[in-house]
Amino acid sequence: MDKLVSLANFIDKINEYVGRFVSWITALLVVVVFVDVVMRYAFNTSFVFTQELEWHLFGFIFLIGAGYTLLHDSHVRVDIIFQRLSPRAQAWINLIGTVLFLFPGCYLIISTSLKFVMSSYAVLEGSPDPGGIPWRFLVKGCIPAGFLLVWLQGFSLLIRSLMTILGRSETPKEAA
């Protein structure tokens, strides 16, 4: 069990570091949007590159940050009933949800998107707009990468749920 706890802690550290990096990308996105707005309203001009960069940065933040969000239990869900349940009942719900929904969903998205990314890479897909961002396959690559991070974090959640169900007195995070 200690090996599983160590693995869960390792996965948590990966997503924690990734999440911190993504927070800096979020700051960069704010700057890019600010520049785009100033250019549009103050100088009556806009660049395709900055607009596409906004979309690409947002996609990166959303996809790559999803594992971090799962780590901190911040995904949207209906907590009206869940929060009133015992920790063990919550662990059962997390375990069942992870096995029945999260793992198959991640598998489906990763396996499907890899083909999508590879075909984009094969033709070195870029923006169809003049002045747009080249190498669109890079942002498309965030799809399988992001869902791999979610899958890994789901595995950590599964380990932690099992520990709670088995009545382990300390949580894996406390054992680190």
Image (spheres, helix red, strand yellow):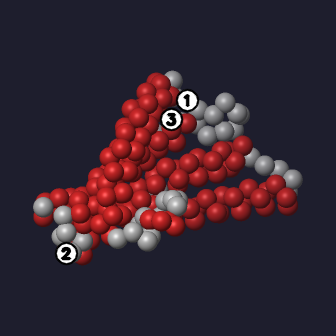
Name which residue type carries label 2: Ser
Crowd around label 1: few <14 · some 14–19 · many ≥20 (10 Å): some
The quarter of the image holding the C terminus is bottom left
| Disc 1 target residue | 125
Question: Pointers 1 and 3 in contact (CB under 8 A)?
Answer: yes
**In terms of sequence position, does the residue under pointer 1 or pointer 3 come before the other?**
1
Say which element carries label 1.
loop
Relative to 85, 34 lies left or right: right
Residue 154 percent location from the top left of the image: 34, 53
Using the image as rendered, state which of residue 52 and residue 94 is in the foreground.
Answer: 94
Q: Mark 3 vs mark 2: give the one in front.
A: 2
Name which residue type carries label 3: Phe
Name which residue type carries label 1: Glu
Q: Mark 2 vs mark 1: give the one in front.
A: 2
Say which element carries label 2.
loop
Using the image as rendered, state which of residue 172 and residue 34 is in the foreground.
Answer: 172
Residue 116 percent location from the top left of the image: 48, 29
C-alpha span from label 1 to label 3: 6 Å
User: Could you say which disc has been placed on residue 169 in the image?
Assistant: 2
| Disc 3 target residue | 137
Up the image or down, 80 lies above or below 104; here it is: below
What residue is at 65 percent from the left and 63 percent from the top? 31
C-alpha span from label 3 to label 2: 46 Å
**In terms of sequence position, does the residue under pointer 3 or pointer 2 come before the other?**
3
Question: Pointers 3 and 2 in contact (CB under 8 A)?
Answer: no
